[in-house]
Each structure stands twice: as structure tokens, then as C-alpha cells.
Amino acid sequence: MSAHDETTESWKSSAIGGRIRVALWLRDVVGEGGRFSMLQVREAIPGINQIDRRMRDLRKAGWEIVDYRQAATLAPYELQLNKIGSPVWEPEFRSAGVRRVSSRLRSEVFARDHHRCVRCGIGAGESYPDHTGSVARLTLGHVDPFKHGGATTADSLVTECARCNETAQTLTGPRPSVDQVWDRVSGLGRADKRRVLEWLEQDRRQLRPDERSFMEIRQLPAPQRDTIKEQLRRQLSG
């Protein structure tokens, strides 16, 4: 049996890391030029937390994985492996593309962005308006997700919810069509349209003072939140 044959089945082994298992599955099952879906990945490699992120991390190691936004021939649920990058299953390439973010840096970025996704504006634990029962989980994303190299600093990171951050997450449920989205946008007032355009041009949603205050209050312990709530009630009823 060749060395390649020995690793062919290793993507099924729970003894190795999720990123390596995804890489081996893509190499041995999908192959360059092949198409697949995140459902297939989850079915092949069950039980891995944030497997979407494990696959996305391969891009930082030179793997070219595109979705329908980069390849018009793909369906919304499809992904395509254009190029196999660094062989992360080999010991000398295990850390290829992996960047460690310290808890201190993570907290700094979350605090700077007011614990809210800069893309869609949702806060941690809030429900998505278009998907009842699904709550937001905040993570970190790069300002330019397709830019490789350079240091991981606060300036290069932004707070994003998992749905905005993880491409595959956006493909797991029904999403509104571009025509449906445009119908809603075109129905907005002029001031609202201008605000949406500003957010799009800056690629982030700017918080109003009341929204910023709300997000700051949400970060306080429950007793302190209740104190502010009562103070607001008394102030407004006076």
C-alpha cells in the first residue's frame, strides 16, 4: 500500500484535526475542479465544531475554494475546489495559514465594534429577523478576507456574526433572492436608502447613538442592566 493510500482513508479518522480531515476529503473525494456542498462535508465528517470555519481556513493555506459569488456557474448551495494548496496533513505544513488570535486581541476587536457584526449589524445572541430561532454568534473576520499574509492585528480584523463570516453558513438555509431584496430596498424612504448606501460603501453598518448605547448596556451584568432600565423608566416618566 502506498503512502497516499494510507492517508486516503484518514479523513474518516476522528484522531486527526478537523482542518486536516476536510483537506484530505477534498483532495481524495472532490479533487481539483470538483463541486461539493457543505451538507456533503458535514455528512462525510460529522461531529466537528465549526467545520465551515475549518474549511475556510484552508484558503489561507493556498486552497482555492469558491462559491457562486465568485463563479456564476455554481448554484447557491455549491462550492468548487479550484486548487489544492499546502498539504496540511504533512507535519511541516500543519500550521500553514493558521493565525492565532489572542483572547486579548479578540476582546479588543469585539469592544471596538460594540459587540455587533459590522456587516449586518446584529448583536451577539440576537435572533436573525429572517430566520426565527437562529441566534447570532460573533466571531472575527479579516477586513479583506481574500488577502493573505501580513500580521493579524486589530486593524486587520472586524467583528462579524458567523453567518456573515462563514460563507458556507450563508448557504445552509433559504435566502431571499436579489429581486426580493431590491424590492425591499427600493421601498425605503430616501433617507433610509442613503444610509444603506453609506453602509454598503463602507462595508459596515454604522451604529446610531441609541444603538451604541443599547449594545454597551447589553455587555453589563444583569443587575446593572436592570438598574439602567429602571433609571430610564424614571427619567422618561418624570
Image (cartoon, helix red, strand yellow):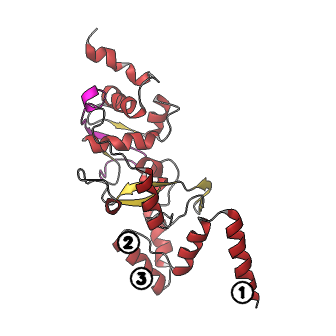
The Cα atoms of the two marked residues, 1 and 3, are separated by: 33 Å
Q: Confirm whether the magenta stretch covers residue 119.
A: no
- Of residue 186 and residue 25, the one placed in the foreground of this image is 25
Of callouts 3 and 2, the N-terminal one: 3
Instruction: Tell me which residue sits at (30%, 44%) in the image.
Output: 59
- Of residue 176 and residue 26, the one placed in the foreground of this image is 26
Magenta: main secondary structure: loop
Which is more foreground, mark 2 or mark 1? 1
Image coordinates of residue 171 in percent, x first then y, are 46, 49
Residue 205: numbered disc: none
**Which range of residues does the magenta coloring cover?**
70-93
- Image height check: is 164 above or below 9? below
Residue 235: numbered disc: 1
Instruction: Tell me which residue sits at (34%, 32%) in the image.
Output: 23
- Density class for disc 3 (Cα within 10 Å; few <14, some 14-19, many ≥20) is few
The Cα atoms of the two marked residues, 3 and 2, are separated by: 10 Å
Q: What residue type is labelled 2?
A: Leu
Q: Pick the quarter of the image with the N terminus.
A: top left
Would residue 141 appear left or right of 90 to someone viewing this image? right
Image coordinates of residue 110 in percent, x first then y, are 47, 61
Q: Name the residue under label 3.
A: 194
Q: Is residue 64 visible?
A: no
Of callouts 1 and 3, the N-terminal one: 3
Question: Are the residues tagged 1 and 3 within 8 Å (C-beta)?
Answer: no
- Of residue 115 and residue 171, the one placed in the foreground of this image is 115
